[in-house]
Structure formats: structure tokens, C-alpha cells
Image (cartoon, rainbow, N blue to C red):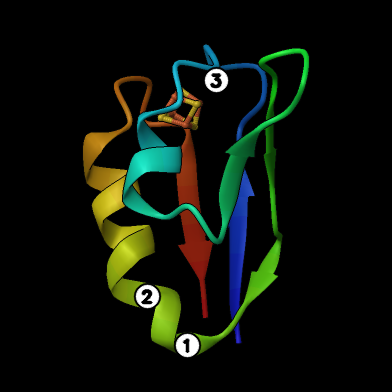
Amino acid sequence: MINVKVDMSQCQHYGQCVLEAPSVFELNAKDRLEYVAQVADDEREAIEDAIDICPMQAISMVQ
Ligand code: SF4
């Protein structure tokens, strides 16, 4: 399993991560980011892409 963490004090809710890993990140009805904190290993590449694209460098993961 991969533990995903978003620093919500940095996140600006732009949603780029949602495009890269839609099964992990989503914008809710109020356009606020929500995410799954524990995901399967096969999401690793998508999460790495989300980490790379996040303009606030708010996403991290630990295995
Ligand atoms: S890309 Fe980064 S700043 Fe944008 S919603 Fe995702 S975590 Fe937040």
C-alpha cells in the first residue's frame, strides 16, 4: 500500500492532480480537494505524475 498525503495548507484546489490520478484525487461539490490516503501499489505511477504536476508541491507519498 501507498500512503498519500496532501498538505492542505498548501493546496490551492486547482485540480491538476485529479487529471493525473482520478482514482485517488477528486474535487468535491464545493471544488475542494478530497483524496484517498491509502491506495494500492499499482497507483504509484499516477501518483508520481500528480506529485510532479502539483504547482504547490503539496503532495507526498510514503510506501
Ligand atoms: S494539484 Fe496540488 S494544489 Fe492542485 S488540487 Fe492537487 S494537491 Fe491541490
Please identify the quadrant where the N terminus is shown.
bottom right
Task: Report the residue that reaches farthest toward the right.
Answer: 29
Does the residue at mark 3 contact the one at mark 2 (Cβ under 8 Å)?
Answer: no
Please state if 42 lies on the left or on the right of 49 as rendered.
Answer: right
Q: Which residue is mark 2?
A: 44
Tell me: residue 25, above or below residue 43: above
Residue type indicated by callout 3: Cys
What whole-number distance in Å separates the C-alpha atoms at marks 3 and 2? 20 Å
Which residue position is annotated with label 1? 41
State how far apart marks 1 and 2 are (Cα). 6 Å
Please identify the quarter of the rendering in which residue 39 is found.
bottom right
Is label 1 in contact with label 2 (beta carbons under 8 Å)? yes
Looking at the rendered structure, the kind of residue marked 2 is: Arg
**Identity of the residue drawn at 73% across and 28% down:** 28
Cβ of mark 3 under 8 Å from ligand 1: the answer is yes
Mark 3 surroundings: few (<14), some (14-19) or many (≥20) residues within 10 A: some
What residue appears at the point 24 percent right and 54 percent down from the top-left corner? 49
Residue shown at 35%/41% (left/top)?
19
Dot 2: what SS?
Answer: helix
| Residue marked by disc 3 | 11
Q: Is residue 35 above or below residue 14?
A: below
Report the front residue among 36 and 56: 36
Marks counted in the figure total 3
Q: Residue 31: image x %, image y %?
A: 66, 15
Q: Which mark is residue 53?
A: none
Residue type at mark 1?
A: Asp
Image x and y of residue 4, in percent = 59, 60
